[in-house]
Image (spheres, grey):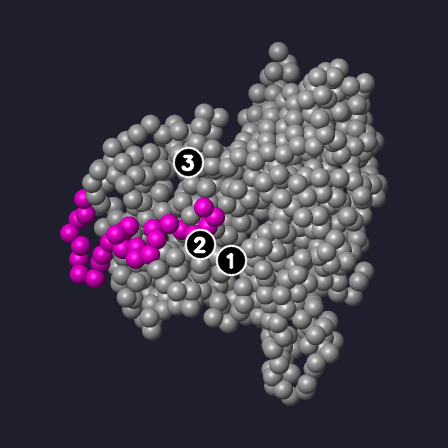
Amino acid sequence: MEKISESTKKKDHAAKISGRALYVDDHVIDGMLHGKLLHSVKAKARIAEIKLPELPDGYFVVDKSDVAGTNRVHIVLDDTPVYAEDTVEYVGEPILMVVGPECKEVERILHEIVVVYEEQEPLLDMRKSDVVFFNYNYAKGDIEKALAEADRVVIETFQTGYQEQAYLETQGIIAYPHDGRMTVHGSMQCPYYVHGAVAKALGYNAKDVQVIQDVTGGGFGGKEAFPSILACQTAVAAKKANKPVKVIYDRREDMEFTSKRHPSICTYKVAIKNGEITGMDINVLYNSGAYTTLSPVVLQRGLICANGVYRIDNLQVAGRAVKTNTVPSGAYRGFGAPQTFFAAELMMAHIARELGVDSLELKEKYMVKQGDTTSTSGKYHFHVPLPEMIQRMDELTGYRAKRQLYKKQTGRYRKGIGMSLFFHGCGFTGSGERDYIKAVVKIRKNTDDTVEVLASNTDIGQGLKTTFCKIVADTLGIDFDQVHIENPDTDRVPDSGPTVASRSLMTVGGLLQRAAKKLKKEWRPGEEQLIEERYVEPDYLIPFNLEEFKGDAYPTYSWSVNVIELEVDTLTATHKILGAWGIYDVGVPIDLNILHGQMQGGLIQGMGYASMEQMDYNDKGVIRNNSYSDYIVPTAVDVPKLVTEFINNPYPYGPYGAKGAGELPVVGVAPAYIEAMENALNICINKIPFTPEDTMKGLQEVNQ
């Protein structure tokens, strides 16, 4: 084990364990008002009239007419209104905010407001949508020839649903005006995203907006773009009141009206000739919901991953993200990849069944290696450790032997085991890091020879404060306690980019290591010094062209193999997970304790996605399961034996050889889980979540 991998006490451990850490709802400011949003109860309608009750002194309403800047939230295409205009496009769209000094009175007023709607027919089924927000396609080889010359063409469609981020802390923002400026703080992943959005909504210059991240109780992607929306609404209210305004979502509001993982429908057409896979024609459909938010980049990643870890010379991939009158979809850990990896892995398993061979045997035949061409005609520049990971997994689990043992079982209790192979492309897709993010970090050495890390990346539970400080301390050769980091404040830290895309440690941590090396050379005891470092793209990359979808989509890849073993009770149709294993290549681990926590949490999150996290809307576009009573997530009693291991595969351009880690563990769990179900029940499955109800239906079909 590398010295840098040894675990240390987290920087925020004492504050959190003692209860001293302040989350957004813990903050109280003199004169602070409370805001509560009025959400649309219709999926698609024109707002004909809004009838307000008499408002007591000190209470007022904020709506579109109060937006001094642009009534659009700056995300990607800027189509999400700050407040609804003449129409509403989904159940939950914010129409106005009631603001006042007492929460109960605010809620009373809110419940007495009458909105007169002229209802229109909502479009809820993504398959019927003709409003295409984004449409990408790419190809290599000659798929038409491969299909025409095939002995057989296997066609299957796979479906995935919503997944709620289920973070511990709900969405929350405080905004307050002062000295001609607006300060916003709250629960968030990306302070500079919020900064740009608020400036645009208020019509302010960038220098007149300050954004501070409060201690944040989890995100999983749910606090990437949504805080920009809530911050704009809250800042507009604070500007109108000329007082601080706090808005905190309750749990039902948060679960019903905030962004989810994109539901997907993926259709695979696979050409087979002489027992060989000769081509894949893949069509991907994502449900964006009512507005675009982050759909373009989510879809891009999903398409890049559509053929999994497999070398397919004749490949065509097309994808659309379409509009429906449902809650806008957004970022979620894995960011579009879990949907297509689920489809790709199960497609390979089902082809193996068609060919009468073991699924792992087929997968090993086609999995990529260093030097191979990627799906987008880039290159796998570095070692692909899948063979040794598979071998180690077989040693840990007895996978190959159990796979044969569990075939064609009878009896009430039946076991199954499944394996998935997958990657996560580290960092922003294509040239986004170079052309759009342009990350900057700083390190300040104080006169007492302590050092402060200045970066805009946030610790939302993944341990970034600790790992950043470890990198700087170890590089400088000073004690860990001499290095400090605070929650980002845009008045104090440069824009080092958002906390997304498994980029923070690899990219920003790399910049901090370079800055620390400079500081070490220039170190002057007792003097204040400030070192700045800017992102420079590695020169080995094949330029990525988004129009053609060609080139290196990512600078490198993190790899993983997952195995799930489970038992199905064929009488009750319930599933019991007997064990879950993950082997991970994240380059060189920077802190093993943190990483084991990340990987084990990701395994459990993936199990929920595969088996129980069922969320849908009714025929009116209303998400009904909006609490933990009816949206079921894994709890402590669902946690099986978990085994997580890491291999050492240094990335030469990462700090100490580190690569991306945070999103990797959730990407490939679902296909391993479903392949285990198929092994146990001897059926084919094409959807997740695959619940006990689905299991009962599958058993009934087998027994007919």
* Residue at the image point whose x is 17% and y is 48% from the top: 53
> Does 52 lie within the magenta span?
yes
Q: Position of residue 212 (x, y in %)?
A: 46, 65
Q: First in sequence: mark 1 or mark 2? A: 1
* In-image side of 444 versus 523 (left or right): left
> Does 369 lie within the magenta span?
no
Q: Position of residue 441 (x, y in %)?
A: 60, 67
Q: Which residues are magenta?
A: 51-77
Residue 637 visible in the picture: no
Please identify the quadrant where the C terminus is shown: top right
Residue 607 position by quadrant: top right
* Residue at the image point whose x is 51% and y is 41% from the top: 295
Instruction: Check disc 1 and report the residue beneath it.
Output: 190
Q: Position of residue 107 (x, y in %)?
A: 27, 51
Q: CA distance from mark 2 to mark 3?
A: 19 Å
Q: First in sequence: mark 2 or mark 3? A: 2
Q: Amino acid at mark 1?
A: Cys
The mark total stands at 3
* In-image side of 559 versus 41 (left or right): right
Magenta residues: mostly which secondary structure?
loop
Secondary element under disc 3, as helix, strand or loop, is loop
Please identify the quadrant where the N terminus is shown: bottom right
The answer to the question of whether label 1 and label 2 lie on touching residues, with beta carbons closer than 8 A, is yes
Q: Amino acid at mark 2?
A: Pro
Point out which mark residue 227 bears.
2
Instruction: Check disc 3 and report the residue beneath it.
Output: 326
* In-image side of 645 versus 285 (left or right): right
Q: Residue furthest top?
A: 704
Secondary element under disc 1, as helix, strand or loop, is loop
